[in-house]
Image: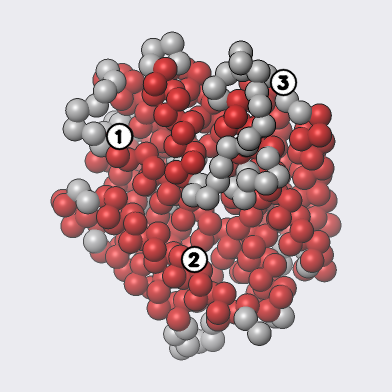
Amino acid sequence: MLSRVADALYWMGRYLERAEHCTRLLLVTEDFSTEILALHEELARAEWADLLAIFPGSRLTRRAFPKAAPFAFPYLTSFYLDDQNPYSTFFSLRKARENARAVREALTLEVFLGLNDAYHALEAQARRGIRDVPAFRDALSATQKGLLGTVGAIAHTLTRDQGWLFLKLGEAIERTARTATILIAKLPALLDPAPKTDIPLYYTRWRSLLRGLASLENYRKARGAQMEPALVLRFVLFDADAPRALNYGCRAVKDCLDRLDKPGELTAPARIVGRLCSRLSYEDREVMRRGDYLGFLHSVLAGLDQAHEAIAAQYFVT
């Protein structure tokens, strides 16, 4: 496969995953902050501020808002509609579409039209503007459905060839890295030995974390109604079956690389990802015993960044 085609499909996968991820986080954050606003305004504001840590390098739009506008408005506008924010839904969806257009011949009609329709619907929203939070919620839900429809078309119509593998490789790298950044942003407050909220709200925050990772139902299926921090952490870090868990995500990256490489070949990306998978498979007890979750997460994220650089050097540089 031509390196430019592989590169475009890889980034299409990354940007599609990033757009869906940002859209979901906005929906979950809006829902949770609205729920707790009357009980704990400081925490509601902190939930929105976490987005700046989850998406490093992002920024809030500089446009002026009416004094009466809810404090969520700058975040919703910046992370949904701002085409200058490199992590906004609009920016990510536009980049996914640009990469798709560059390799139109590698995609099915269903995939291309689904992505195109989702982009144009969001572009129209950005032109019209959104005036209140309920309208934002409706628009976000519509965008999420469009993105999931595109992902469904990818799953149901694309041939499982090298193009598919590069697209899924980008998706898996992005998903796993974003899980790590969410946990890095959220855990310091959640693991505070003296939580500043009452007990019901404390556990509600853990449920919100799982919702942000699209993992609440999967967690309940595996662990039942117990919302204990240690159980949640073991699940999102080390579960081998949940698609948003770090262990599963790293194995998805490894599977793509194994199928792209020649039999018996051990490339630089494969070595890096192999080490990460080994740690996530065998260091669970040690990590849980030490409790150094942030140190572990930073090392995993650094490994994923190294893997991305190695993938670019191995497959995309001509």
Q: Looking at the image, which residue is at 51% across and 53% down?
A: 175
Q: Which of 289 and 91 is in front in this view?
A: 91
On the image, numbered disc 1 is attached to which residue? 190
Does the CB distance between marks 3 and 2 fall below 8 Å? no
Q: Looking at the image, which residue is at 45% across and 25% down?
A: 45
Q: Which mark is residue 126?
A: none
| Up-down relation of residue 151 to residue 283 (above or below) | above
Q: In this view, does 57 lie to the left or right of 117?
A: left
Q: What residue type is labelled 2?
A: Val
Q: Position of residue 181 (x, y in %)?
A: 43, 49
Q: Position of residue 274 (x, y in %)?
A: 38, 73
Q: Residue 131 carries which label?
A: 3
| Crowd class of label 2 (few under 14; some 14 to 19; many from 20; radius 10 Å) | many
**Which one is in front in this view, the residue at disc 3 or the one at disc 1?**
3
| Up-down relation of residue 299 to residue 7 (above or below) | above
**Furthest-left residue in view?**
289
Q: Earlier in the sequence, mark 2 or mark 1?
A: 1
Q: How is the image coloured?
A: secondary structure
For the C terminus, give its image quadrant: bottom right
Q: Looking at the image, which residue is at 39% across and 42% down?
A: 185
Q: Where is residue 180 in the image (x, y as percent from the top left)?
A: 41, 51
Q: What element carries label 2?
A: helix
| Up-down relation of residue 43 to residue 236 (above or below) | above
For the N terminus, give its image quadrant: bottom right
Q: Which of 224 and 44 is in front in this view?
A: 44
Q: Which of 97 and 159 is in front in this view?
A: 97
**Which one is in front in this view, the residue at disc 3 or the one at disc 2?**
3
Q: Which of marks 3 and 2 is nearer the N terminus?
A: 3
Q: What residue type is labelled 3?
A: Arg
Q: Nearer the viewer, residue 237 or 59?
A: 59
Q: Where is residue 200 in the image (x, y as percent from the top left)?
A: 31, 19
